[in-house]
Image (cartoon, coloured by chain):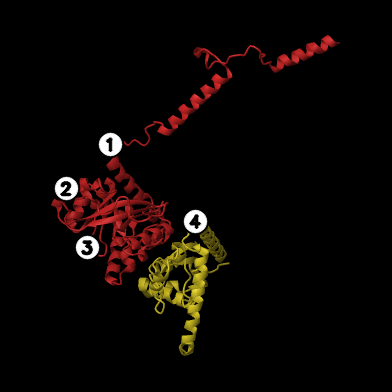
């Protein structure tokens, strides 16, 4: 199962549909469509910008999730994240400076930290900060598409240096690779992404985890947070029978009853179920009894 | 006995975005459009040059020196948009990364492309087998889609489209040849 958790939503449905179809063709199984809130959150969150159900046809094999990105500009405006969780499957935050990154790592109730890697960060990333995020289950996302499409050489360089920094600091744990593809051409196959990661200094196994295991844990954690009891207990199957099966069974029981009634004309209800011998019918003989009868018969002839 | 060790990359060229010329005329099925044939102008020499440019852009002279020792296009088929590239075993990842970073075919053609490495192999035999397997698979898929598409009555289905495309390409090629017959001679010199 390969995951691509960042495909930006745009109103150009044809282009988006093409991207999704191409992702399916390349072998991805789960794709998250992202809506980005730049600046402050609007007061009215309904209706969400990504329509429900989706307005574009999607390949049947592919699972589509909804995700929102929020820019963290200052610490005060982020008390409304729980409201967002009702509308989206995944909540990601994009910190813009050191302080908000600290806040996102330590306390915010989000699922993903997505950094804009084309920028140059003033300070080095520190393990204690990112380590707390990873132990909390908040993963860090690397988006590779800007490196492919921009002609801007400094952006490319920044992305590579930031990616290697992040890989070094987190020791390869808790990283997710996603495309953030604004056009179809920025999407790459999973194996190509793993190779890119290994060029950046992440081993093959870890690179694969970044496309399979880690994003899966993000998706499942987010689901549990929304649907389960306090994020701990979830009812997977209640053990009840589906309604139509019960109906079928009742029908069958009635049928068998009817048949019984036809064969054996009148029976007391209490006797039903116990094998009843018809008067004309002989008792079935055991094999031993048959042999014995035969023997006695032969002896009598002699 | 020591020998030079190589890696063989099986490469597939995919065309996810529509070219402006074909989009207006008729709608080609998604599968067919994605796996459309590479323009004939894109020959093995151009591919090799594109890879070299990519490596120099990403890894500089050092990467070029390391990778170019046994870089070679063993097989290139524009019709199926596949190629087999030989590269040194120790540095195949550089060549792969250069291919990943490629977004369009080189200068005179400029078609947007996504290059996918579908198999890395130590021997050319296995690489060739993979190419054949892929080709068979895609034909099977096209046939299945054709069967499914017959009910929709959208037209002649997959095979009809292919026939149409081939005819149109032939016509275009003839026209191009007539126009550029003299220019080609100049460029060869």
The chain drawn in red is A
User: Which residue is located at x 52 percent, y 66 percent?
Assistant: B160
Q: Label 2 to label 3, Cα distance in Å? A: 26 Å
Say whether marks 1 and 4 touch (CB < 8 Å).
Answer: no
Checking the image for residue A79, the label placed there is: 2
Say whether marks 4 and 2 touch (CB < 8 Å).
Answer: no
Rendered location of residue B137, percent (x, y): 53, 59
Checking the image for residue A229, the label placed there is: 1
Q: Nearer the viewer, residue B51 or A268?
A: A268
Checking the image for residue B151, the label placed there is: 4
Q: Is residue B186 above or below residue B42?
A: below
Q: Are marks 1 and 4 on the same chain?
A: no
Classify mark 3: helix, strand or loop: loop
How many other residues sit within 10 Å of disc 4, few (<14), some (14-19) or many (≥20)?
Answer: few
**Left or right of residue A89: residue A242:** right
**Closer to the camera: disc 3 or disc 1?**
1
């Amino acid at each position: 199962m390969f995951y691509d958790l960042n495909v930006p939503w745009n109103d150009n449905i044809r282009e988006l549909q093409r991207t999704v179809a191409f992702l399916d063709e390349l072998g991805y199984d789960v794709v998250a469509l992202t809506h980005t809130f730049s600046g402050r959150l609007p007061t009215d969150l309904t209706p969400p910008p990504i329509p429900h159900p989706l307005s574009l046809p999607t390949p049947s094999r592919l699972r589509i999730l909804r995700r929102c990105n929020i820019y963290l500009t200052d610490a005060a405006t982020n008390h409304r994240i729980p409201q967002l969780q009702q509308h989206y499957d995944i909540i990601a935050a994009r910190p813009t400076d050191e302080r908000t990154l600290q806040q996102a790592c330590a306390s915010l109730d989000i699922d993903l930290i997505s950094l804009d890697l084309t920028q140059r960060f003033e300070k080095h990333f520190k393990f204690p900060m990112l380590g707390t995020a990873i132990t909390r289950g908040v993963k860090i996302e690397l988006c590779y598409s800007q490196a492919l499409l921009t002609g801007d050489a400094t952006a490319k360089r920044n992305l590579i240096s930031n990616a290697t920094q992040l890989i070094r600091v987190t020791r390869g744990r808790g990283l997710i690779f996603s495309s953030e593809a604004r056009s179809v051409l920025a999407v790459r196959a999973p194996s190509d992404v793993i190779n890119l990661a290994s060029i950046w200094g992440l081993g093959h196994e870890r690179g694969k985890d970044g496309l399979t295991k880690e994003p899966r844990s993000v998706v499942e954690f987010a689901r549990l947070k929304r649907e389960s009891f306090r994020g701990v207990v979830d009812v997977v199957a209640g053990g009840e029978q589906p309604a139509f099966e019960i109906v079928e069974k009742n029908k069958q029981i009635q049928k068998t009853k009817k048949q019984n009634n036809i064969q054996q004309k009148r029976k007391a209800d209490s006797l039903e179920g116990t094998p009843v011998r018809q008067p004309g019918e002989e008792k079935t003989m055991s094999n031993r009894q048959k042999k014995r009868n035969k023997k006695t018969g032969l002896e009598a002839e002699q | 006995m020591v020998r030079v060790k190589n890696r063989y990359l099986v490469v597939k060229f995919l065309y996810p975005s529509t070219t402006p010329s074909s989009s207006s005329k008729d709608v080609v099925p998604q599968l067919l459009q994605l796996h459309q044939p590479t323009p004939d102008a894109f020959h093995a020499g151009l591919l090799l040059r594109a890879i070299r440019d990519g490596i120099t852009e990403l890894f500089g002279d050092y990467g070029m020196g390391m990778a170019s020792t046994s870089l070679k296009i063993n097989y290139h088929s524009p019709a199926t948009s596949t190629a087999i590239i030989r590269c040194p075993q120790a540095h195949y990842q550089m060549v792969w990364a250069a291919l990943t970073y490629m977004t369009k075919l080189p200068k005179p053609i400029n078609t947007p492309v996504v290059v996918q490495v579908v198999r890395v192999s130590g021997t050319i035999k296995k690489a060739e087998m993979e190419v054949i397997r892929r080709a068979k698979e895609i034909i099977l898929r096209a046939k299945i889609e054709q069967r499914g598409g017959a009910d929709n009555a959208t037209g002649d289905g997959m095979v009809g489209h292919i026939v149409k495309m081939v005819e149109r390409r032939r016509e275009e090629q003839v026209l191009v040849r007539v126009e550029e017959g003299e220019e080609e001679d100049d460029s060869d010199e």
